[in-house]
Amino acid sequence: MKRLGLIALLVGALAIIVPGFWGRDKADVHIAAASSFAPFLMGLRDDIAQHCQISIEVSAGSSGMLAAQIQNGGPFDIFFSADDIRPQSLIKNGKSKHAQTYAFGRLAYWDTGKGDMDTRPLALADPKLAPYGQASAQSLVHLRQTRNVPTQTVWGRSAAQVFQFVASGAAQAGLVPLSLLRLGVIAEDQYTLVPQDWYSPIRQDVVVLHPSAGADCLMDMVLSPRIQAMMVKAGFGTAL
Amino acid sequence: MKIDLTATKGAFTLKAKADWPDSGTTVIAGPSGAGKSSLLHAILGIDRAQGAVMFNGDALQDNKTFVPLHKRRMAWVSQHDDVFAHQSVRENLRFAERFAAPGGMELSEIAERFSLKGVLDQNAGTLSGGQKQRLILARALLSNPRLLTLDEPFGALDAEARHELLGLLQSLCVEQNLPLLFVSHDFDTLTRLADHMAYMEDGQVVAQGGLNACLLDTALPFRYREDACVIRRAKATAYNRDHGLNRLDLGGADLFVPGTAIGKGMDVRLRLRAGDISLSRSHHQDSSVLNILAVEIEGIEHANQTKGAGLSPGLVNVTVSLHGATVLVRITEKSARALALNAGDRVFAQIKASALVGG
Amino acid sequence: MTEAMIEPVLLSLRLASVTTLVLLALCVPLGWVLARAKGHWRPFAEAFLTLPLVLPPTVLGFYLLVLLGPEGPFAPLHLVFSFWGLVVGSVVFSLPFVLRPIQSAFEAIPDSLLHSAASLGAGPWQCFTELAVPMARRGIISAAILGFAHTLGEFGVVLMIGGNIAGKTRVLSVAIFDAVERLDYATAHGLSLGLLGFSFAILLGLSWLNGRAARP
């Protein structure tokens, strides 16, 4: 009986293990995209397949991590960063020829405050870690002059984390990318757009790491007026 | 066996040099902390010591060779319950049988002798303490070793169970002609088993020789014990069923010992306790003591002549020759004076003897 | 469940199974050597093998990435961003969790028992395979459970050296994080629930097996 159980366990384990020896690669173009932009790209999957005759695979992550992975041999063809610093450093290291701006990040102030009694903090992206962080810090100075903003602050490692702080109710308010608010379908009356002259532009650049006809087509498509219009709807500033 | 071993473990230093017969039963005796077990470990190669071990003409260890424990063919019965608790009794025995050199005992025979037949398929971990000890000993014998070694054998068992197992062990060793080396500080155990002794103090072998020589050695504590004794071999010659008495031949003298019948012609070990023997100038015909034998006084040792933990005041150790064999007698100083005993005197010894069956 | 949801589940199971098997093959002999070692090097070896516990997973992942990457000494093995890279990372990360229980189980076997067996004529190999391993089986099974569960839930190292590639390195934990990041809570909840339920079933099964192994 004991032996039988062990054999069953072994067979089960093998059934799971064996298929692993044939890792598959079904996508034509492999994209690394900042977490804030990845959902938009995934929404374009069918559109891209139809327009460029290619299948895409999107790997999401923080821009910093993705850049480190590309630096160390990450198998990606295109990298959509949430800033312009990481693409520049990749170019400097010879991973790509040139960078192109595909969008601008837009910041919004999301307030779920319940009056004067509210003691919950304000959530911000860490300026050292997240591409939106520096803009948030710049905006906060102006924000404090015009509004009653929670005095206590908490720092998120990424824009998504800031969003989750506020969404969960742990933070009263936060400076969040507009794209995330749109993605999360947050009611328009809960947030206000931060004026663009309050912060230096959040330039979001893309680099092609392994050029191909499919990659070129995709790049043209992303920069086309039709897709750029869709991006504005999704909460990004247009690059055109 | 010839040994010359040195080892250091913390503050303790083992520095043992000794030479005892390869056959028969040898005890490593001495006070606790003397390094008896350490010496046994070094002999077996469990703890690696510097020096040499020679056994049956083979160098088990010298400056060129070191035979590992599993190739020494020296079975070890430790002080612990070393049964393989995840196996059945039969599997425990089979394990030993697999590595045995040909010519040893059969598994079924051993199981029979050690009363393990009924529990062969029982899990070894569920045995009683006594059964475990029997299994460990049976397993050791089944491996057909060249030497059986035991560390404080059966110390965890009560006296009766221990005596039974020691008797069984001894008769099997005689049957199989298997040399035995054991460590013990238990006087009863060592007088039951040993033929030779190596006596240790502070990591050194300070005395060695035949058992009786050591039991009588004035430099060793044995002859000053309250239960001091010598061990003599005797042959059973007759048994009187009406009286329940065995007649034994002790070097030409007849000795009567009560108890169950001992097979005629069988060799037995006789324990002659110093306190169970009294001396008289005349042959009393009206004594309750059965054995009254003529002896010659070899020497007299008074309490004030002994050093350290010697005799208690008022007691005297008298060594007498009984048909050429030395026997120790414990009497009072008062009696010694009253009888005016002197070396060379011929007197009568009244002896109550107990036979240790086996060997 | 869509394919995008099933794939990470299967991948995680594959990773956890392979990692556990590799860890057992590694830690059973290693635990034995450490448990029986008397040399002065032992504390150093133990401290070294416990180090993966100290570094935060993402930091450990970063160093593995650099070591296994194209500029690193292990570049010819092509391990980064592959399934086998994840196995290497998970093995390193979970090693202390598997090694410790196994080593403890071996240490619990009395020296005298093994020496007794050796004195019967059993060589080191027989003592190891026929006595030590069966006697330590509970510890070994516990270690396997810990290793399996720890690998299933592992995230930082796997994200760093795996690169979140669907079908290859996007394991369950990464897929859940991914879903949370893009506010796809339905997928995140589904996967999390699946992870919890499935892990519970596996752990329950292994505990059951462990309980049976404990019985004489």
Image: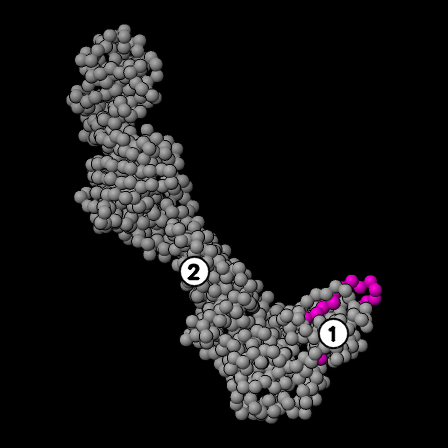
The residue drawn where x is 49% and y is 78% is A73
The residue drawn where x is 28% and y is 53% is B98
User: Any magenta on residue C151?
Assistant: no
The residue drawn where x is 23% and y is 46% is B62
Label 1 sits on a secondary structure element that is helix
User: Any magenta on residue A108?
Assistant: yes
Label 2 sits on a secondary structure element that is helix
Q: How packed is label 1: few (under 14 Cα within 10 Å), some, or many (20 or more)?
A: many
The residue drawn where x is 22% and y is 13% is B348
Viewer-closest of C40 and C102? C40
How much space separates mark 2 and mark 1, taking CA atoms? 54 Å
B69 with respect to A220 (left or right): left
Q: Which residue is mark 2?
A: C27
Which disc, if any, is residue A73? none
Q: Using the rendered view, name the quadrant where residue C188 is placed.
A: bottom right
Q: Is residue A226 above or below residue B91?
A: below
Most extreme residue toward the top is B338
Chain under numbered label 1? A
Q: Is residue C50 above or below residue B214?
A: below
Segment tinted magenta in the rendering = A105-125
Q: Amino acid at mark 2?
A: Cys
Q: Amino acid at mark 1?
A: Ser
Q: How many marks?
A: 2
Chain under numbered label 2? C
Q: Is residue B336 above or below residue A137?
A: above
Dots 2 and 1 on the same chain: no
Quarter of the image where the N terminus of chain C is located: bottom right
Visible residue check, residue A38: no
Viewer-closest of B226 and A135? A135
